Amino acid sequence: MNIAQVAKQFDLTASTLRYYESVGLIPPVNRKKSGIRDYDENDLKWIEFIKCMRNAGLTIESLIEYTTLFLAGDSTIEARNNILMDERQRLIEKRKEIDETIKKLNKKIEGYDGELLASEADLKKD
């Protein structure tokens, strides 16, 4: 597949795909004799993985490190697992913060609803 097809499939721009490759988020993509990138199934799996992890909030730095370690071989399995566990913990903590913020907002909204209902009741009395 060429870069335009891959970009369309993953709803990314060609620039984003080139960036992913240039910073090491995905391994180097094979090229045709003409120099055009020729994405294969393995490349697509990497892009899907990186996009999923980015959407989940993993940092680019962590993903670059993960990819670098992956390319270094099986001796890095523990280090890769540690990266994923650290990122998961960071996301769990972030989710807790978001949940607390939502609770506070819900209380605030409930307060407004109560005040609004009280004011409407006062209007009906007149």
Image: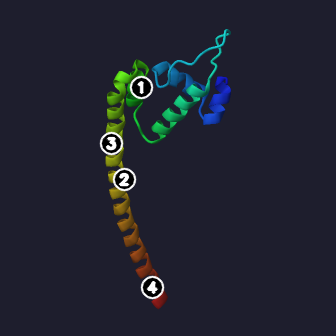
Q: Residues within 10 Å of mark 3 (few under 14, many from 20)?
A: some
User: Residue 126: in sight, yes or no?
Assistant: no
Q: CA distance from mark 4 to mark 2?
A: 34 Å
Give whichever of discs 3 and 1 has the lower sequence position: 1
Residue type marked 1: Ile
Tag nearer the camera, 4 or 3: 3
Q: Residue at x 36, y 50 (%)?
A: 95
Tag nearer the camera, 2 or 3: 3
| Picture quadrant where residue 33 is located | top right
Tag nearer the camera, 4 or 2: 2
Write down the residue under mark 1.
Answer: 64
Give whichever of discs 4 and 1 has the lower sequence position: 1
Give whichever of discs 4 and 3 has the lower sequence position: 3
Q: Position of residue 78 (x, y in %)?
A: 32, 30
Q: CA distance from mark 4 to mark 3?
A: 47 Å
Q: Residue at x 46, y 21 (%)?
A: 24
User: Residue 104: in sight, yes or no?
Assistant: yes
Secondary structure type for disc 1: helix
Which numbered marker is on residue 98? 2
Residue type marked 3: Arg
Q: Is residue 59 above or below residue 34?
A: below
Q: Is residue 94 above or below residue 21?
A: below
Residue type marked 2: Ile
Which sits in the foreground, 97 or 126? Answer: 97
Is 93 positioned to the left or the right of 39 in the image? left
Give whichever of discs 4 and 2 has the lower sequence position: 2
Q: CA distance from mark 4 to mark 1?
A: 59 Å
Residue type marked 4: Ala
Is 26 positioned to the left or the right of 96 in the image? right
Give whichever of discs 1 and 2 has the lower sequence position: 1
Write down the residue under mark 3.
Answer: 90
